[in-house]
Image (tube, grey):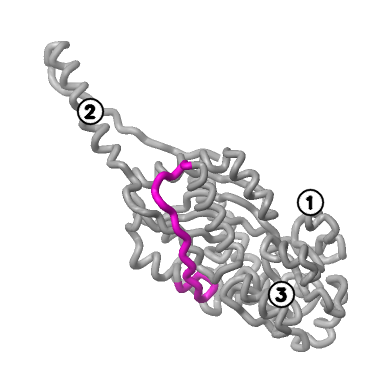
Amino acid sequence: MFSIKRISALMCAGALALSLGACSSNETASQGKKEENTGYPTKAITVVAPSGAGGGWDLTARAFTKVLGETKIVGQPMTVENKPGGGGAVFMAEYATQQVENNDMLFVNSPPIVINNLKKEGNSPYGYKNTTPLAQLTKDFGAIVVKADSKFTDLKSVLEEVKKDPSKLTFAGGSAPGSMDHLISILPAYKYGVDPTKVKYVSYDGGGEAITALLGGNADVIGTDASSVKEFLKAGKVRVLAITSDERLAGDFKDIPTAKEQGVDAEFTIWRGVFGPEKMTKEAKTYWEQAIDKLVNSPEWEKEVETQGWELEYKNSADFKKFLEEQESQVQQLLTALGMQK
């Protein structure tokens, strides 16, 4: 897990006297330092959450900017901007074409940046290869959720109902069909022997909107990231039927069984990371690599991650890019199994 920084050595040519050579070297080094240190960043930084308020991307972007500001790791003002649409695909198209050199605009994302580029329906021509991956920050897990007063008390009861009539229940999530929340929603059904193409799924722009739909009676079940429902669980508004982790989580989710515990081999990890533009300058990239490294090693960030119910899992730029390449292959296999690949 490493970042690579290449520094070109400036060398003097010619057979000059030692004293002149030393002066020349000092002058050249000074010029090089001026060229390298242009003071980036010189403007306010925008961090985009490509969804509505309240979902995992929004929470991550706000936590990221909050801690970087409070610790003064980043001196410039940082603001969060919500740009919902198509489970992140609308913003991705804008970013990959109109913001390709904008060092002052970063964004957060998760598996949809890979999934949206590989799926058949609502396919996005743009993906992580049209960005500069800067770091993975955290990992989260999927949650299968119903209202607190729902008749469903465990995962099997939902799956049995769906198996009898796949169209009877409405599943919802904060991402487009074929994207992350959709995969979380239908993965248990698929593993339970239900044709996933028959399951009724309604998409919303962000986990917050999906939860609102659930609470308002417009959806029977939602598949979303566990951290997004934490406060609703504590408030007694929802019941979490299963978590897609390989083992039980701690804290507020300690009493929630995994899907695997209930006999359904449905595991899904939701990573979240930060990206810059595809043509980000070397100086800007180095700046963010160093700033994020300081962030993830700070006690303030560790506390924020714990408060949000996430798990800290840091990958620097080089390793994050390698991980994305590996996940691209895994997602392609999953979409192919579900008949949703492009």
Q: Give whichever of discs 2 and 1 has the lower sequence position.
A: 2
The crowd level at tag 2 (other Cα within 10 Å; few <14, some 14-19, many 20+) is: few
Going by the image, does 34 lie left or right of 240?
A: left
Q: Quadrant of the N terminus?
A: top right
Report the disc number at residue 250. 1
- Up the image or down, 3 lies above or below 159; here it is above
Amino acid carrying label 2: it is Ser
Relative to 122, is 234 above or below? above
Position of residue 35 in the picture relative to residue 41 (left or right) = left
Q: Give 120 or 223, whichever is nearer the viewer.
A: 223
Point out which mark residue 222 bears: 3
Instruction: Look at label 1 and name its amino acid.
Output: Ala
- Whether residue 1 is situated above or below residue 254 in the rendered picture: above
Q: Earlier in the sequence, mark 3 or mark 1?
A: 3
Return the residue nearer the eye: 334 or 167: 167
Residue 68 in the image: above or below residue 96: above
The x and y percentages for residue 257 are: 84, 61
Q: Which residue is mark 2?
A: 30
Residue located at (35% from left, 47% from top): 41
- Residue 18, position in %: x, y? 16, 11
